Image: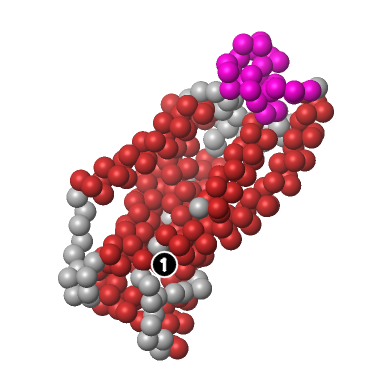
Amino acid sequence: IFWLLLLYGISYWFVVTSVKPDIGLARKIMGSRWGGALADSLLDGYGDQEDEVTRLNQLSSRIAPALALLYAIGGSFLVWDFVMTLDQEWFSTLFGVFFLIGNLQATMGILIAIAVTVRNHSSVLAEYITINRLHDLTKLVFAFSLLWTYMAFSQYIVIWYADLPEETPYLVIRSQTEPWSTLFLILFLWLFVSVFIGLMPKTLCRTPNYIRFMGIYVAVGQWLAVYMMVVPSLQHFGHYHILLGFHELLITLGFGGAFFLCYVAFLEQVPLLPISDKHLCKSWHGH
């Protein structure tokens, strides 16, 4: 819980630091009423625009690497506490990294889906969300697919080669016991083989609607991967079954809906583009 609160707190600090210059410039151009109560609270004590941009950019550059390290370390602790401890006798030093890589791939997929949707509905933002930028995000999804598979294999080969008895049941249940072994094979084909083949052609990776589908496809696949990590540990030995019903669907839709509600509410209060960034105009038609 401590790591979770710390991660949320520093993430909030980073977001506020990043958007303050944009809100300040928007209010300077559009008038003092722009942004409402949120802008009033964030810009309390806000000084000269140029000085604040310099100061906040420097602060953001210091917070960002610290936040990345905190996500890697704190996120691993959270995964160990929330997921790995469900199976009391099983442990893996690679599990935290493996889990976080999957989360990052799913995040990239959702980001692509959002970016393409926004691009299709806004001719102005379409000039900024270029095909080159979407292609770069697609490359990241492809790279994380390879890295995720590599970490899964690395975790498996160490346990198999060392013949560790306390770690073997976790993998045997998921890879050799029905019905989980079928889902195991499906996820291998879903998150590695099909993504590897589907994102290899450059022409397809530069087709917005196609990569939006692939982004959603990867995110759903990672959801199933998390499901397979968690649910078998909650079932009695020898009585394994896959339950994908309304409970799982509604919980997922609930959290997803809460996320998008917060996301849309946030976008309504801040500029959609980093208008205070001096490099924005230079990169408008770039990568």
For the C terminus, which image quadrant? top right
Quarter location, residue 28:
top right
Left or right of 132 in this view: 84: left
Left or right of 100 in this view: 250: left
**Helix, strand or loop status at disc 1:** helix
At 66% from the left and 16% from the top, the residue drawn is 27
At 79% from the left and 35% from the top, the residue drawn is 55
Left or right of 27 in this view: 225: left
Q: Which residues are magenta?
A: 20-47
Query: Where residue 218 sits in the image (x, y, percent)?
Result: 38, 53
Amino acid type indicated by mark 1: Met
Along the line of sight, which residue is nearer the eye, 27 or 139?
Answer: 27
Answer whether residue 72 is visible to the viewer in this image. Answer: yes
Along the line of sight, which residue is nearer the eye, 160 or 113?
Answer: 160
Query: Where residue 166 sits in the image (x, y, percent)?
Result: 38, 82
Quarter location, residue 31:
top right
At 47% from the left and 33% from the top, the residue drawn is 263
39 drawn magenta: yes
Query: Where residue 262 sits in the image (x, y, percent)?
Result: 46, 32
Give the tally of numbered discs: 1
Answer whether residue 144 is visible to the viewer in this image. Answer: no
Colour scheme of this structure image?
A: secondary structure
Label 1: few (<14), some (14–19) or many (≥20) C-alpha neighbours in 10 Å:
many
Left or right of 68 in this view: 95: left
Query: Where residue 80 sits in the image (x, y, percent)?
Result: 47, 65
Circle 1 is placed at which residue position?
A: 84
Quarter location, residue 38:
top right
Along the line of sight, which residue is nearer the eye, 162 or 45?
Answer: 45
168 drawn magenta: no
At 78% from the left and 29% from the top, the residue drawn is 52
- What main secondary structure does the magenta stretch of the protein show? helix
